[in-house]
Image: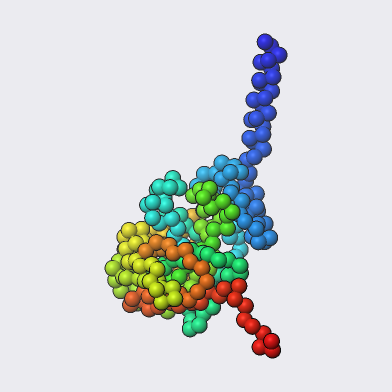
Amino acid sequence: MKIAFQAILVSCLFLAFSSLAEIKTPRELAEMLIQAERQNQDFPLLSKITALREEEAYQVQKIFVGQKDIAGFKLGLTSKLAQTVLGISTPVVGVLLNSGKKTAEENLILALGQQKERAIEMEIGFVVGVPIHTALATQEEWMSKVKAIVPIIELPSLRFKEVMKITAIDMIASNVGSDLFIVGRQGDKNQALKTLKVELKKEGKAVLTGRGEDAMKSDPKLAAFWLANAVIGRGWVISENQILITGALGGIYRGGPGHYEADFSELGKISFFWADPANKPRDRNS
């Protein structure tokens, strides 16, 4: 009996020490993401490696972003359905990078390697006119810091092999799929946005429609105010000319190569061509 008890005790101690060995620091976890990005590999599911609280996931994100050139900040998981599925009650915050920023122009062509499908989202962006270091008390104070409104097309990329197994923690730590985004021309910050109608077409056919109020089911200006304070609360400074985007309008369209045009009503249009890598141009000498 005594030998059996000792065997059980040893087994319990072994399991306890094994669990402790799996605990990773935010820096160690961020390094796993950094290495995967450098080697162009899928991101690991950090939630399966160690237990992480939301605050720790944001620490991982901050280390992962590191000294990269920041273009702004984004809201993710703004729909209540997505939040319910992932067990959270508020949207998540990510960092936009200048490496992924494109300016809307005629005949804009995107080359996305061998990808055949990606999420395409219509969003509204707020261009900041002055640095913001501290929390904002009101929406009016927030809008006094904004110098322009811009239409945005975002093409996020979730670099996980098992997408159906990701958690909100994985989303936050890996920077909420932040990748490519296209910025349209600047418009008047005082125009009404809640009732703004948007439409996405592929090859001339409507594939997605939405309204400004789709951003957190409220006025995009209120959603951006919430985002600004969330960013400041995470220890970031919002710099002049950085852009805050407030989430998908009309949902997400999963599309592949082709010609796209997004109509943002008074804010203007953004069009781009997603080049199909399978259709290589013929050699003129052949």
Instruction: Identify the residue at horizontal 45%, vertical 54% (top origin).
Output: 92
In percent of width and height, residue 126 lies at 41, 69
The quarter holding residue 132 reads: bottom left
Horizontal side of residue 212 vs 25, given as left or right: left
Instruction: Identify the residue at horizontal 38%, vertical 51% (top origin).
Output: 81
In percent of width and height, residue 130 lies at 44, 71
Placement of the N terminus among the 4 image quadrants: top right
Q: Residue furthest top?
A: 1
Q: Residue furthest right?
A: 3
Horizontal side of residue 132 vs 115, given as left or right: left
Q: Residue furthest front?
A: 286
In percent of width and height, residue 116 lies at 55, 66
The quarter holding residue 113 reads: bottom right
Horizontal side of residue 66 vs 200, given as left or right: right
Q: As displayed, is residue 171 above or below residue 219?
A: above
How many numbered circles are shown? 0
From where the camera sits, is residue 239 visible?
Answer: no
In percent of width and height, residue 173 lies at 55, 53
Placement of the C terminus among the 4 image quadrants: bottom right
From where the camera sits, is residue 276 visible?
Answer: yes
Instruction: Identify the residue at horizontal 58%, vertical 43% (top origin).
Output: 48
Instruction: Identify the residue at horizontal 51%, vertical 68% (top origin).
Output: 256
Colour basis = rainbow
Horizontal side of residue 216 vs 282, given as left or right: left
Which of the pair 161/106 is nearer the observer? 161
Which of the pair 283/138 is nearer the observer? 283
